[in-house]
Amino acid sequence: MNSIRKSTFFVANLDIFDIILNVYLLKYTTIDKSRFVRLGMEIKEYKDFREDEILRLYSEVGWTAYTENMTALRRGYEHSLLVLAAYEEDDLLGIIRAVGDGFTVVFIQDILVYPDKQRQGVGTALLKAVLARYPDVRQIELVTDNTPQTVAFYKSMGFSDLSEMGCCGFMRA
C-alpha cells in the first residue's frame, strides 16, 4: 500500500476460528507460545528491529512510503502489540505486525512476504500465528488493497468484508 488506493476493510469471522485453529494445529508444531515451525520455516517474535532487513523487505514489496521515515517505522515496530517473523534458517521470508489492546481489538497493520516467497504458505502461517495468539479477541481487523488476490486470501482465512456485516470502515490518510 505504497499510496492510498481503494482498500477493503475486513474483520475476522471468529465463528469459524475453532476450525481454523484446529487445521493450524495439525500443520504446525508449537515450540512455545510465540514460535511455530513448519516445513523448515520458523515463525517467532521479531523483537530486535534490524533496519537493513526491514528496509529490504518493504522495498521489495513496494511499500516505500513506510521506508521514507525509518525512525517512525522503527518506533511503530517498538510500540506494536506483536510482531512475528517467518524465517527459513537465517533468511527472513515475511513479517506480520499487529497493533491494538490484545483483548477486545487487534488490527493487522502489516503483513509482508517477499514476492518470490508469496503463495507458498508464509502469509497464511503468519496470520494463523496471530489468530492463535488472540483466540478470545472480539475483533481482528485489517485494511488491504482491494484486489481479487488479497480479497480471496483474507476471505479464505475467515475474514469478511465489513460491508457484508452491515458495517463500513473509514481511513484518514
Image (tube, rainbow, N blue to C red):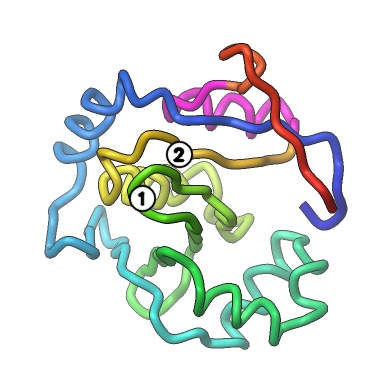
* 70, above or below 138, in the image: below
Amino acid type of disc 1? Val
Part of the protein shown in magenta:
146-160
Position of residue 6 in the picture relative to residue 74 (left or right): right
Residue 150 on the magenta segment: yes
Residue at point 33%, 48% (across, down): 103
Position of residue 127 in the picture relative to residue 161 (left or right): left
147, 77: nearer the viewer: 77
Task: Quickly name the residue at label 2.
Answer: 140
- Which label is found at residue 1? none
The image quarter in which residue 72 lies? bottom right
Spatial CA distance of label 1 from label 2 is: 10 Å
Q: Nearer the viewer, mark 1 or mark 2?
A: 2
Amino acid type of disc 2? Ile
Looking at marks 1 and 2 on the same chain, the residue that comes earlier in the sequence is marked by 1
Q: What is the x, y in percent for residue 127?
A: 41, 46
Residue 70 on the magenta segment: no
Q: What is the x, y in percent for residue 156?
A: 46, 24
Position of residue 169 in the picture relative to residue 141 (left or right): right
Q: What is the x, y in percent for residue 14?
A: 35, 26
The image quarter in which residue 8 lies? top right
Q: Are marks 1 and 2 in contact (CB under 8 Å)?
A: yes
Residue at point 52%, 50% (across, down): 108
Task: Quickly name the residue at label 1.
Answer: 130
At label 2, counting other C-alpha atoms closer than 10 Å, the crowd grade (few under 14, some 14-19, many 20 or more) is many
Residue at point 39%, 80% (across, down): 47
The image quarter in which residue 150 lies? top right
30, 116: nearer the viewer: 30
Q: Secondary structure at mark 2?
A: strand
Residue at point 36%, 68% (across, down): 88
Which secondary structure class fits the magenta region best? helix
